[in-house]
């Protein structure tokens, strides 16, 4: 993060300076301007946290403005999901909900104004010719033969464009700036295009639509936005932004400030690519728990507090970079550790049967919901001689430093007793199906009276009480840090990780049946989980693993590998 002496990032420092120099007439006023052509993702969250955060910190306001100037890709489904996601992230635009399409009439009038001033003209070169005439970064462009068209003629054609007399692509309104300008965006950029398309708000009222560059700054000015914060790719558009504001009779003078967009490892963030993942059914929707969308993260069990904290940690800077996904997961784990109640569930079960357990007896144990916070309370969990434990907690032929179950090994079952593995039962293929153990009745509560120590403590559920649950484990959706790093004849879908979702049929302690959807829990030793909002039912629970805990055995394996 780039910060000033008093710890402000460069955007906030610029806002503070503008206030100090009297350049902010009333309050600081920002906006978040999504295009409703997809669901919001974690990159948008960064922009939301920045825009609403700055408004809040400087006692100002932040608008929500749908930048709906491209009718063909936009939809009300997206409008609604975007509003839901912003609210869920903890922000509120109050009564300041706007649409760029609300300004179409005003934008049209200003376009006529520019034509009247000789600052815009109707061109009839084809799209291809316009590209050819534009030049390159090193060579100047050429003037269109229609550039000197009389004002009256441009005005007439522009009105007829609006009236629907022409088909798509035949005419275009361009600003008249400088075809030799060093900045290509200043070489007579497009202001209006003909597009006979139905718009999700204005219906068929328009068949010409303003370009992003034309609509955006003017919408800012209409709303009295003081700081128009956007991502770095618009830096080269700033001269055009300023040119339009200077040359139009707009009611205010917003300032554009650019910051680096968020990129994350193992993640694609372009809405075009996210849409393909949905349409081609690599995922089960925009809110699939593997998607980097706000709705996907919510369904996965990420909290809004964790996302906001992540955005705070990464800060804002002026250079593009890629943030490690592990930092996002760290923020989630940190937040869930503080709030999630602890339960026991076995994700990949194997039977454990206690040979010397008094037949038919149920022993109840008091189990606290939080190891650090007694006020979180506790519940009773039933223990019997018929249990499930985690398959990965047993190893037939373990290496040194294995403190879990193995033939002849003694372990502690959390809250309950010490057990020793005495026998292994197999199916006809030789797979282990059951562990026969003995227990030490003296070790009730997890301490042996003779002071005998065991290192491993395992989680378990009682088979007679356990409730089945589908448990969904996730890995990253892509198998490499940069999903765009693919062979020449491939696209990003070649980087999809075939193991991104594993479905397990596990068992939970009965108390979890009453858990509301959306409430995060920790399954001891297995990670943080949440009931899936799409698939989970009262009588058929489905859990998503939000994020794992750090696994001490995985660390041993890793250290060992590194030391070899
Ligand atoms: P795409 O290019 O995938 O369509 P976009 O940037 O055009 O995405 P918008 O809906 O226009 O998406 O974005 C709304 C706001 O969010 C803009 O101000 C944009 O700069 C910001 N934004 C989008 N992606 C990111 C990102 N990865 N990091 C930070 N801000 C972002
Ligand atoms: Mg955009």
Image: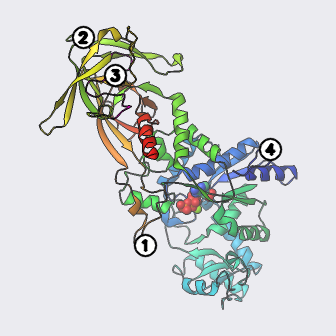
Looking at the rendered structure, the secondary structure element under dot 1 is loop
Residue to which mark 2 is pinned: 361
Residue sitting nearer the eye, 386 or 134? 386
The tag earlier along the polypeptide, 3 or 4, is 4
Q: Where residue 142 sits: x, y (%)?
A: 67, 89
Q: Earlier in the sequence, mark 4 or mark 1?
A: 4
Q: Which residue is mark 3?
A: 411
Residue 189 appears in the picture as rendered:
yes
Label 1: few (<14), some (14–19) or many (≥20) C-alpha neighbours in 10 Å: few
Q: Is residue 177 magenta?
A: no
Give how far across and how far down residue 158 sits, in percent. Answer: 64, 79
* Labels 4 and 2: the sequence-earlier one: 4
Label 3 neighbour load within 10 Å: few <14, some 14-19, many 20+ = many
Question: CB of mark 3 within 8 Å of CB of mark 2?
Answer: no
Q: Where ligand 2 lies, by quadrant? A: bottom right
**Rounded to the nearest whole Å, what is the CA distance between mark 4 and mark 1?**
47 Å
Residue at 75% across, 45% down:
60
How packed mark 4 is, by other alpha carbons closer than 10 Å (few <14, some 14-19, many 20 or more), is few
The residue tagged 1 is: 488
The residues colored magenta run 399-417
* Residue at disc 2, secondary structure: loop
- In magenta stretch: residue 415: yes
Q: Position of residue 311 (x, y in %)?
A: 61, 46
Secondary structure, magenta segment, majority class: loop
When asked about the image quadrant of residue 360, the answer is top left
The answer, for residue 105, to whether it is visible in the render is no
Label 4 sits on a secondary structure element that is loop
User: Whole-Å distance between the Cαs marked 3 and 4?
Assistant: 54 Å
> What residue sits 56% from the left and 42% below the top?
307
């Amino acid at each position: 993060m780039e910060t000033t002496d008093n710890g402000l990032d460069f955007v906030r420092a610029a806002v503070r300076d503008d206030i100090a120099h009297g350049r902010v007439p009333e309050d600081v006023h920002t906006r978040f301007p999504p295009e409703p052509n997809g669901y919001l993702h974690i990159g948008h969250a960064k922009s939301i946290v920045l825009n609403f955060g700055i408004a809040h910190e400087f006692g100002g306001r932040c608008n929500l403005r749908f930048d709906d100037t491209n009718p063909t890709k936009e939809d009300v489904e997206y409008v609604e999901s975007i509003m839901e996601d912003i609210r869920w992230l903890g922000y509120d635009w109050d009564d300041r909900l706007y649409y760029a399409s609300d300004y179409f009439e005003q934008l049209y009038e200003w376009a006529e104004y520019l034509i009247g001033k000789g600052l815009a003209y109707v061109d009839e070169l084809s799209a291809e010719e316009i590209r050819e005439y534009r030049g390159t970064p090193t060579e100047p462009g050429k003037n269109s033969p229609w550039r000197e068209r009389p004002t009256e003629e441009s005005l007439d054609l522009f009105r007829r464009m609006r009236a629907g007399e022409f088909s798509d692509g035949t005419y275009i309104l361009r600003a008249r700036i400088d075809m030799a300008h060093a900045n290509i965006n200043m070489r007579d950029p497009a202001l209006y295009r003909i597009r006979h398309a139905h718009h999700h708000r204005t219906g068929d009222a328009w068949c010409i639509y303003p370009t992003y560059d034309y609509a955006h700054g003017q919408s800012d000015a209409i709303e009295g936005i003081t700081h128009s914060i956007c991502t770095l790719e618009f830096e080269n558009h700033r001269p055009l932004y300023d040119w339009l504001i200077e040359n139009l009779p707009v009611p205010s003078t917003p300032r554009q400030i650019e910051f680096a967009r968020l990129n994350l490892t193992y993640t694609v963030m372009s809405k075009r690519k996210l849409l393909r993942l949905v349409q081609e059914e690599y995922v089960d929707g925009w809110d699939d728990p593997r998607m980097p969308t706000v709705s996907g993260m919510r369904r996965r069990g990420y909290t809004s507090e964790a996302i906001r904290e992540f955005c705070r940690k990464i800060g804002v800077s002026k250079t593009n970079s890629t943030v490690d996904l592990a930092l996002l997961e760290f923020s989630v784990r940190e937040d869930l550790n503080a709030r999630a109640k602890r339960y026991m569930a076995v994700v990949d079960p194997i039977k454990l049967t206690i040979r010397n357990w008094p037949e038919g007896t149920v022993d109840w144990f008091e189990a606290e919901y939080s190891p650090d916070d007694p006020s979180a309370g506790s519940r009773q969990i039933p223990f019997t001689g018929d249990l499930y434990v985690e398959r990965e907690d047993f190893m037939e032929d373990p290496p040194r430093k294995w403190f879990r179950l193995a033939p002849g090994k003694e372990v502690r079952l959390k809250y309950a007793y010490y057990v020793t593995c005495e026998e292994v039962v197999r199916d006809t293929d030789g797979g282990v199906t059951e562990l026969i153990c003995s227990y030490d009745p003296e070790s009730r509560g997890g301490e042996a009276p003779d002071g005998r120590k065991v290192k491993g403590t395992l989680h378990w559920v009682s088979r007679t009480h356990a409730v089945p649950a589908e448990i969904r484990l996730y890995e990253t959706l892509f198998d490499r840090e940069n999903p765009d790093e693919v062979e020449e004849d491939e696209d990003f879908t070649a980087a999809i990780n075939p193991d991104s979702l594993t479905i397990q049929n596990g068992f939970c302690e009965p108390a979890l049946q009453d858990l509301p959807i959306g409430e995060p829990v920790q399954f001891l030793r297995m990670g943080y989980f949440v009931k899936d909002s799409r698939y989970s039912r009262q009588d058929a629970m489905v859990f998503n693993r939000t994020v794992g805990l750090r696994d001490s055995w995985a660390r041993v394996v890793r250290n060992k590998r590194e030391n070899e």
